[in-house]
Amino acid sequence: MTEREDRTEHALRMGHADGTEPPGAANLAEQTDAAARTGETGGGAWLLETVAVSKRYVRDGRPLHVLDRVTLGVREGEFVSIVGPSGSGKSTLFRLIGGVERPDEGRIRIAGRDVTGRRGLISYMPQQPSLFPWLTVRQNIASALAIAGIDRKKAAALATEWLERIGMGDTAGAYPDELSGGMKQRVSFLRALLVPRDVMCLDEPFAALDALTRTRMQAWLLKQWEAHRRAVLLVTHSIEEAILLSDRIYVLGGAPATVLREIPVPLPRPRRPDMWNEPAFGRLREDILTLLGRSGERDD
Amino acid sequence: MDVRRWRRALPPVFAIAGVLLIWQASCAAFGIPAWLLPDPWSIALYMAEEAELLFGHVAFTLGLALRGMLLGVAAGVICAVLFHLLPAVRAAFSPLLVASQNIPLIALGPLLMIWFGVGILPKLILLVLVCFFPVAWSMLAGLGQSEPQLREYLAMIGASRVQAFFRLELPASLPYFFAGLKLTATYSFLTAMVAEWLGSGRGIGYFLVLQYKGFKTTGVFASIFCIVACSLALYGLAVLAESRVLGRLRMGGNRAKGGGRA
């Protein structure tokens, strides 16, 4: 057995454990350290796992290895972020989790069930708001809920009720082109929040916003999440965003992308948007930057 | 209607009035006989006198054109949806359809008469053949052009093929549908008129043939004015429907895709 196969085997075994084990990020030496620290953030069953997931494409006739045995997971009520530079295969990973594509190796599991290649099991918030321009805000939300199998009337009622709840009741009948970028993303988030799925996958939801709106949206998302505590997997290239929002962070890097390290965030909850002042925040930021910098150098 | 729109309407009104005046003046100045080129005023008088007769023929042709258009548009939409959902069918039949548009109506008309007699059926078939193509082709393009972001979003939330079709592709194709509809509206009245040449006892096409065979040039011109007016009216209806529907669906900005305004 080659070393590579052995690693895969190891990762698979870890994934098969009784569900309280952290997913084995069996790529680097730091992994042991990370796994040990994960123990602190508490157990609970894995809601979403990717187990040793690999993906290769052929681009311009040349093979392109995007993901290499990526193993990570999200527990019930946990906010987990994936941080990595642009082009590190984060969006590919989401497509695999969403079932839009199948991994070449490895499995996707939700609540312990193998759901590799199955669609419609997660709720999803894309980078662009992706609201339908010919539907009102309320219809946009209701339409997504209807696709998720919720009765049409109930979907509309839910949309109205929750728009009120987040203070956007007066925009229910407005069309997306009448809203600001931040407002659109709030609608997009609410749409994802209301879809009755175990895990919310947020794909760089604030990347297209200006810096000020982005900061405000992070604070808003923090408030919303603290109130609802849904299991969230957030993909971002902003280290600060990941630290502020997450319970744990997976640092993704290299080409092909691997989990460089799994890092629990030692900041208490509830979080405040101004926590970036705290020394723990700064240290963590330095750690992740160094980690990504090192992986960057290694590629050169 | 605000002042700016009035101002935009003024130049073409002046241009048309100018042309009519020059026409009228030339007929008088050069003493052109009425059987060669009647002056606009006599044409207007003739139309007023024969209003009832003309109206009967126009109404008949308009009815034929509208029925043909309705059937043609329905066939076009069905064809576009079928081709879009079944790429194999599209690959197999699209060359045939394009070829069908190159058959000259002048040749097809008599054939349809031989096969289906002189009733309404061959005329409707001819109309459908002409009317369905712009709608089918334009809408087919539209169905394939929906926003990739929205497509990806629907895939990620697990929407089925049918859901993606009804929630994204169909609404997104509407501006293209209307572009096709406007083309069809322009052709339909002319085609209905040509269809009447294939043996009909009524309609403005029939009336036109009758007039020019008797060298009644004034009648020919009266028919031409009726035909142009009806074609424009149908086009106007299509534009109105377009702006109503697209306006409601917040797609007004896409109107440029329809080849602009008249």
Image: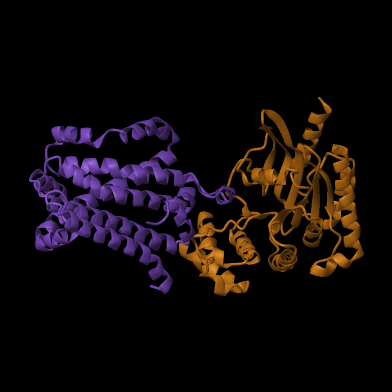
Residue B260 pos. (x, y %): 42, 54
Q: Residue furthest front?
A: B29
Q: Who is closer to the viewer here, A295 or A153?
A: A295
Q: Is residue A65 above or below residue A174?
A: above
Snapshot quadrant of residue B107: top left
Residue A234 pos. (x, y %): 72, 54
Indicate the quadrant containing the N terminus of chain A: top left, top right, bottom left or bottom right.
top right
Residue B160 pos. (x, y %): 50, 47
* Residue B220 located left or right of residue A45: left
Name the colour scheme: by chain
Q: Is residue A17 visible?
A: no
Indicate the quadrant containing the C terminus of chain A: top left, top right, bottom left or bottom right.
top right
Q: Who is closer to the viewer here, A93 or B143?
A: B143
Q: Is residue B106 visible?
A: yes
Colour of chain A, in one word, is orange
Q: What residue appears at the point 42 percent right and 50 percent down from the top-left corner?
A: B176
Q: Who is closer to the viewer here, B73 or A265?
A: B73
Q: How many marks?
A: 0
Q: What residue appears at the point 73 percent right and 63 percent down from the top-left corner?
A: A214
